[in-house]
Amino acid sequence: MTVGAGTLDRDFPAYALVGNGHKFTGESLYSGKGMGDKLVGLVYDKGNNGSSNLCLAGSLEPSIVKGKVVVCDRGTNGRVAKGVVVRDAGGVGMILANTAASGEELVADSHLLPALAVGRKMGDLIRNYAKSEANPTAVLSFSGTVVNVKPSPVVAAFSSRGPNLVTPQILKPDVIGPGVNILAAWSVPVGPTGLEEDTRETQFNIISGTSMSCPHISGLAALLKAAHPDWSPSAIKSALMTTAYTQDNTNSPLRDAAGAVSTPWAHGAGHVDLHKALSPGLVYDTKPADYIAFLCSLDYSIENVQAIVKRPNVTCSRKFRDPGQLNYPSFAVLFGKSRVVRYTRVLTNVGAAGSVYDVAVVAPPTVAVTVKPTRLVFRNIGDKQQYTVTFVSKKGADKTDAFGSIAWSNTQNQVRSPVAFSWTGLLA
């Protein structure tokens, strides 16, 4: 399962008050002695070194930054490492300011000196203030923890995006899960920042990354396996994907850290929802033989296929005409030489006997989508039903990447699959 990362509805606010009276909100896990209330000098990109804006090692001149708060652009070296550079040069605080690459995403860090992170927009205002004022000043303060933050979840800036460059007919990522500012146990001999200079000891820490969202999904998969011991890995994967949600806690479409509305190439099927995944109604079940046929359809050598599946006697006697024919819980439609793409999927009933589902299609104006049949009837638990979906690129259509969905629903369940449309297999 390919997992992206999203934020939680919890923040660790910190504030930068500058000399013109403006107060900027950021984020920090700094818990040491604060700066007090007195404004001190503010410095940004001063000196003869061309990398002082990034606060790289050796780039700050002590005669310029001593006793002052330093603004550091995010990027190149580690976030907390920048604070060490500031501290070693005599600075008393740091404002870590995002650039366009990180947008408005904020990651809380256990800084070694009073420091906070701010988004790109606020960072630009602080940078402009530091450059334009004759004697810029600032003071930093910290407020602990707040909850019920809106909007959330938001797709993290560091989360990897699609489209899938290896197999564009398979939509990636699959889902997103909690991956920003995650609280968990920590190895005591290692300081919370992981830096050699950090001699602090703690039993818990807060870190971010898809290395945090992946364990969440693994844990959910384990819970689903415990609840449904007879489910296959693909059934568990399908349950997590088809029940994921795509609206945040303000009932608006999921957003990206950069501020734009997110797409399935950022959040996949959406953010996982364990309660709904426990009872998904229908699943896209896929057997190992289907994955072998999928690998064979990618034109790997038989030796490579055998190495991947660890079956020395496997052959490619069966393969899909198109890798997208795999019974996957999502669709990635690539219009190549043909304007028509047709896929068949099979759904398995894991809900009540006698369940009836009707289809609902959301598609961009550039594509016509037809599903046959439009109703699926499952007389018994475990019954399988097949449907075929035909995607047609309209003549003269704008060949801009677009998105939609196919959902099978009744009064109890909605089994939703995201659909991505593209006219080229290369990342734009």
Image (cartoon, rainbow, N blue to C red):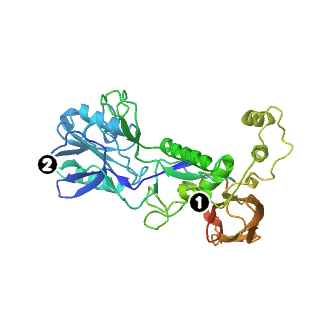
Q: Can residue 50 be seen in this view?
A: no
User: Marks 2 and 1: in contact by CB < 8 Å?
Assistant: no
Q: How far apart are labels 1 and 2 at the CA level?
A: 49 Å
Label 2: state its secondary structure.
loop
Q: In this view, does 61 lie above or below 337?
A: above
Q: In this view, does 170 lie above or below 317?
A: below
Residue 381 picture location, percent across and down: 73, 60
Residue 66 picture location, percent across and down: 18, 36
Q: Nearer the viewer, residue 302 or 233?
A: 233
Q: In which quarter of the image is residue 366?
A: bottom right
Residue 299 picture location, percent across and down: 78, 43
Q: Name the residue under label 2.
A: 37
Label 1: state its secondary structure.
loop
Looking at the figure, which quarter contains the C terminus?
bottom right
Q: Residue 30 carries which label?
A: none
Q: Which of 233 and 316 is in front in this view?
A: 233
Q: In which quarter of the image is residue 300?
A: top right
Q: How crowded is mark 1: few (under 14 residues within 10 Å), some or many (20 or more)?
A: many
Amino acid under disc 2: Asp
Amino acid under disc 1: Thr
Number of numbered labels in the structure image: 2
Residue 232 picture location, percent across and down: 69, 47
Q: Which of 300 and 318 is in front in this view?
A: 318
Q: Mark 1 points at which residue?
A: 243
Q: In which quarter of the image is residue 365?
A: bottom right
